[in-house]
Structures are given as structure tokens and as C-alpha cells.
Amino acid sequence: MSRFHLRRYMPKTLMGRSILILMIPIVVIQLVVGFIFFDRLFRDVTLLKTGEVARQLEFALQSSDPDALIKLGFEVEKVANFTGRGDSIAPLDFTGKNVIEKLRTQFSNVAFVDLTTDDHLVQFGMNFDGQFIQVSFDRARASARNPHQLLVAMTIASLLMSILAVLFLRNQVKPIRLLAKSAEAFGKGRNIPFRARGAAEVRLAAHAFRAMKERIEQQIQQRTLMLSGVSHDLRTPLTRMKLSLSMLEDNEEIEHLRKDVIQMEGIMEEFLAFARGDSAERRQQVDAIALARTLVENNKRAGKTIVLNASDAPIYLTCRKLAITRALDNLLSNAAQHGDQVSLTIQDNEKDVVFMIEDNGPGINPQDRETAMRPFERLDSARNQNQANGSGLGLAIVADIARSHGGNLALSDSEALHGLSATITIPK
């Protein structure tokens, strides 16, 4: 439980984790060195210097020379009593406790030690030969004046080294970011130039990605060429069949054969459109509203009524125009085929554009929607597809176009028309 809780606060990026790995040892080293310096070296120096001052004071108090205290740098004054006075030390006075400890060890009759009234002096009271006296001497004689100088120097040096290390890490992480950006763009059908650089492991990953990209592109090109050849080979016998059927006398059987040939041509064209994809088309900036109005007008001329729900302001989208047009037209035609009420709604989000096509047809069962978007899948019970032409590639083509743009196709129930709702989300 605690491990999972700690993971939520860990940096998510490689740069953040690298900085964390770098900074933790630096902070730990600072703490260890600071502890050793103050608790060992500086404590020992303070005790040694305070002990030396205490011995000088003891010698001056016992000396027959009346000026011995002044000569040794002590100020002594007699007071009535020390009632209510106790030891006082500043919160950040790291060596004050050592000074007090040594004075009380050296003189058993110390009443108080004052280190706060004047931070440049050590003032303490004691009972000497039945008299109350207050002794003052320079604090620098008991401990170092600037004990923090070592830590300040260490901190500045650590900060400088950390800045240099962060700059170095940034240069090492940058090729990884470019590699991830190039891979993401390739998944969306874009091509971002990428040059292998950085550490050996990053270069190895870049070369592997580039080789994989080239193999995929070569495979797609070979598939397209092969299917183009198949298309050419199939068109010839289909043309001969159409020519032969046109020369025969019209009857019911001949008419059925002609429809079969036309259906075969449609299936072949649909199959080639799916296999060819849209990778050859270049991206361009398109006004999604204008594109939608054109599709609605085209369907209107074909006798289909489609309601467009969109703002008057243009919505610009960088995409493959013909591919998006083909995907939307496919969904609109499919919706108009299975319903007499069709609507196209366009929403402009911050990072993407949403096209939602709704109809009042029979819809598709929720458990069959994933299957409907697979290639060559036709649902007998859904939307009367057993009476429709095609090879079951319509939704598969739309889903493939959406994925090639980095988006997705989702099927759901239409709340407005109570039929099917097909939503295409395309990043800007």
C-alpha cells in the first residue's frame, strides 16, 4: 500500500527521474558531511578552544597580578546575585551547547551562560571565593566565527555541478524524446526526420526503429503493388463478362448476372481502397465545417437528407483530406441506408475535432460493435447487412483512416435519434 502511495509522487519523465537519481546522493552527501563536520570536527575544535579559554581564566583568577584578567582579555564585574538567570542560546547556534558544556565541566560553580545578549561575547556568571562575578570574553576565542563557510562552499559547488549535470542529462534525454515523437508520428501516418544521436543505446534504438519503419513501408508498398496487379487481372475478365452479358437477350436471369458483376466490381474497389490505405496522400490544413457542408450537399443531391449541427466559425484540421472525406461519406451513406433521419455533428475540442454521425436505424448490438469494425465482418442481424452489398470493409476502412490520423472510431447508441452513433475523433 505504501509503495503504491509513494509511486504517485515519483517523477513520470525520464528527465525527472534522472534528476532525482542525481540529487538524492548529493543531498545525502551534504547531510553526512555536515553532520560529521558539526558533530565531530567542529565540536572537537570548539571544546578544545573553550577549554583553553577556561584554563586561562582559571589562571587569571588565581594570579596575584591584579591586571592578569585584563591582560588575558577577560572582563569581570561583581554582581549582587544571579536570581532568575539561566543558560540562553540561539536556535541556530550549533556550537553554543559545546561552549556551555565545557564551561560547566571546567567550573563547577557556573550559575548561567549567556550567548544571546551579545552574539559576539560569551557571558557567564559564577561564584568565586564567596562573591558573584560575571565574566565576559570574545566568542571567537571559544569557537570559529564562520562555521557555515564550509557548508556554503559545498552547497555552491554542488549546485554548479548539478546544473552542469542537468544540462548534460537534457542533451542525453533529447534524442529519446525525438525518437518517441518520431515513432508516435509514424503511427499517425506522419514522417518526422530523425537522426540517430546520443548514447550508444539510444543510437541502437534509433537504428532499430528506422529499420522497422523501412520494413513496414516496404511491406505496405509491396502489398499495394500486389493488389494493384490483382485488380488489373480481375478487371479484364469482369469486363469480358459485362460485354458478353450486354450481347445476350434481356431476361430475369441475365439481369441477376449483371447485378452480380456490378457487385463484384464494387467489392473489388472496396477491398483495394482498404488495402491501399491513405499513406500516399499528403496532409493539409482543412476546414472541417466546409468539408462537412460539401458532404451534406452531395448527399442532398443524391436524395438523402442530412442535418448538419456545427458552428459558423471554421474549424481547421491538419489531415489527409480525401481520406477523411471518404471516411465521413462512408458513414453518412451507411447511416442514410439504414435510417431516414441522419445528423452530422462537429465539435471543436482543445486538441481534437469530433465528427458524430447519428441515425434512427436499427443500430448495432453493443456486443457486436467491435466485430463490425473488423475487416470482412458482416453482421447478419445488425442493420440488415444481409440485404446490403459490400464485403464488410466499410467500418474497417473508416477505423483504419481514423487510426492513421492518430484518432479512433467509436460506435454507441444515439441519444437524439435512438439509432446508431458513429464518432470519429481526429487530433488537430
Image (spheres, grey):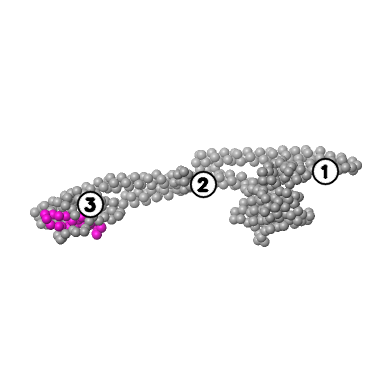
Q: Is residue 197 left or right of residue 278?
A: left
First in residue order: circle 3 vs circle 2: 3
Please tell me the numbered disc located at residue 100: 3
Label 2 CA crowd tier, 10 Å (few <14, some 14–19, many 20+): some
Residue at image mark 2 = 174
Q: Is residue 191 visible?
A: no
Name the residue nearer the viewer: 207 or 416. 416
Closest to the observer, 407 or 269: 407
Q: Which residue is mark 1?
A: 259
Instruction: Tell me the amino acid under the disc marked 3.
Output: Ile
Instruction: Identify the residue shown where x is 74% and y is 42%.
Output: 380
In this rendering, does residue 348 appear at all? Answer: yes
Say what amino acid the circle numbered 1 marks.
Answer: Lys
What percent of the width, then of the height, locates residue 267?
Answer: 76, 42
Q: Position of residue 406 (x, y in %)?
A: 62, 48
Q: Closer to the camera, 334 or 120?
A: 334
Dot 1, how many residues are within 10 Å of its Cα: few (below 14), some (14-19), or many (20+)? few
| Residue at 17% across, 50% down | 108
Range covered by the magenta-colored residues: 112-138
For residue 216, which quarter of the picture?
top right
Instruction: Give the alpha-carbon distance from disc 3 to disc 2, as whole Å.
Output: 56 Å
In the figure, 227 relative to 313: above or below?
above
Mark 1 lies on a secondary structure that is helix
Instruction: Tell which circle, 3 or 1, labels the residue nearer the N-terminal end.
Output: 3
Between disc 1 and disc 2, the foreground one is 1
Task: Find residue 209 and name its label.
Answer: none
Q: CA distance from mark 3 to mark 1?
A: 109 Å
Give the mark nearest the N terminus, 1 or 2. Answer: 2
- Tag 3–tag 1 contact (CB < 8 Å): no
Specify few, some or many for label 3: CA neighbours under 10 Å numbering under 14, 14-19, or 20 or more. many
Q: Residue at x 27, y 48 (%)?
A: 42
